[in-house]
Image (cartoon, coloured by chain):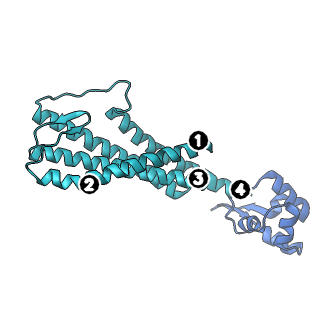
Amino acid sequence: MRKLNILKTILDLFWIFSLIAAIGIVIFLPFYLFSSDMDIAVKIKGQEIPNQNAFTKIIVFINVVSALIFLYSIYLLRKVVGLFQKREIFKTEVVKLFNLIGKLIVISSIISNVSVFIYNMVERNNVGLSIDFGSYDSFLISVSIGLFFMVISEIFKIAMNIKEESELII
Amino acid sequence: MPIIINLDVMLAKRKMRSNELAEHVGITTANISILKTGKAKGIRFSTLELICEILECQPGDIMEFVKE
């Protein structure tokens, strides 16, 4: 269970730092969205967004929502790891949480990538799809991770039923 | 399930209590209760062997097949 403790520590650290950043962004976001004279360089997925018109502000807002959804999935993952530490493994709550985490990661990834795709199409007249090779930041990888969590949820459901049956074998 | 457990009938015939049987077999009274109420999904041969030995009966005396 040492690996579980390491995982919990890493998730806790990531959660705390991300939460601080998220609070900052949530406080700053209304000023960015509703003020016209703010000249701040905003980067989404490594791309600088120079023109701050209504459209780019909507794109930034959508990406912030996507990031918050991702952050919530990390919070839920911490919760699952916490349950594992309490030896609560094959429980309905774990199955539900894994499924929810998977859905949130897929939704967050789709929202973020579709908005960046639309931004590139409208603002840069650049319609194209790229597959990042050898990177964890790829759209396909993030969707796959989400789907993997959903598969894990199904596997845990099967394991839970087998455990219940084995407990009823005298 | 079409397999009916008649353990309580056999216990009554032998004038034995569930907890006594549980003690002899080495399982909990909760498990004996699961067996008696028909909630059990299965029974190990080793458990069946001990129950038959203690109650001096055959497996067919404590369980029967009834078509649904």
Crowdedness near tag 3: few (<14), some (14–19) or many (≥20) residues, C-alpha within 10 Å? some
- In terms of secondary structure, where does tag 3 sit? helix
* Chain letter, disc 3 residue: A
Q: Measure how far apart labels 4 and 3 are at the Cα level.
A: 27 Å
Residue lying at 16% horizontally and 43% vertically, measured from the top left: A40
Which of the chains bears the disc numbered 2?
A
- Disc 1 marks which residue? A3
Residue extending farthest top: A133
Q: Residues within 10 Å of mark 1 (few under 14, many from 20)?
A: few
Amino acid type at mark 2: Val
Q: Which chain is mark 4 on?
A: A
Name the spot of residue A168 as percent of width and height, x first: 68, 58
Are the residues under badges 4 and 3 in a single subunit?
yes
Instruction: Say which quarter of the image contains residue B39.
Output: bottom right
| Residue at 82% from the left image edge and 56% from the top image edge | B47
Residue that carries the numbered disc 3 in the rendered image: A85
